[in-house]
Image: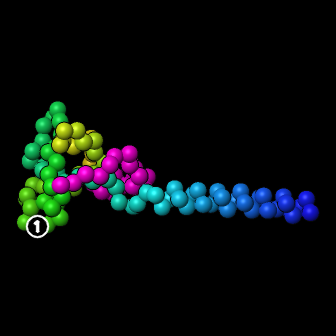
């Protein structure tokens, strides 16, 4: 009987651990945090101006707009990111990011 209890406890620990791992993996998508920015509106002190997402989603938006990944955003300006999506995924590990998503 004691042996049966020990097996149940081990199974519970393994299954519980797998649940935690599954939750951690599914909480992060494969898409990194991104902002639509105007590449022509950049200042060294503040970075790129964040513009409405529709500018990056359509061909009729700003010609100079592009997705900017994993950036810090302050007062409508994005900095310290990358225009390379693959690099952003590598930096963030499965797309996890501490930044919230924003658009407009």
Q: Is residue 88 above or below residue 11?
A: above
- Name the quadrant containing residue 60: bottom left
- Name the quadrant containing residue 85: bottom left
Q: Is residue 22 visible?
A: yes
Q: Residue at x 17, y 32 (%)?
A: 45
Residue that protrudes farthest toward the bottom in the picture: 59
Picture coordinates of residue 88, whole percent (x, y): 34, 52
Q: Is residue 101 above or below residue 78?
A: below
Q: Is residue 35 left or right of residue 65?
A: right
Q: Which residues are magenta?
A: 84-104
Picture coordinates of residue 1, whole percent (x, y): 92, 63
Q: Indicate how the structure is coloured in the image.
A: rainbow
Q: Is residue 52 left or right of residue 94?
A: left
Residue that protrudes farthest toward the top in the picture: 45
Picture coordinates of residue 103, whole percent (x, y): 21, 54
Q: Which residue is mark 1?
A: 59
């Amino acid at each position: 009987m004691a042996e049966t209890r020990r097996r149940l406890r081990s199974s519970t620990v393994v299954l519980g651990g797998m649940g935690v791992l599954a939750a951690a993996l599914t909480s992060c998508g494969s898409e990194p945090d991104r902002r639509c920015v105007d590449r022509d509106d950049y200042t060294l002190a503040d970075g790129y101006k964040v513009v409405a997402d529709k500018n990056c989603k359509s061909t009729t938006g700003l010609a100079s707009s592009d997705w900017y990944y994993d950036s810090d955003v302050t007062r409508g300006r994005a900095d310290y990111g990358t225009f390379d999506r693959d690099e952003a995924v590598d930096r963030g590990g499965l797309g996890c990011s501490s930044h919230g998503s924003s658009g407009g």
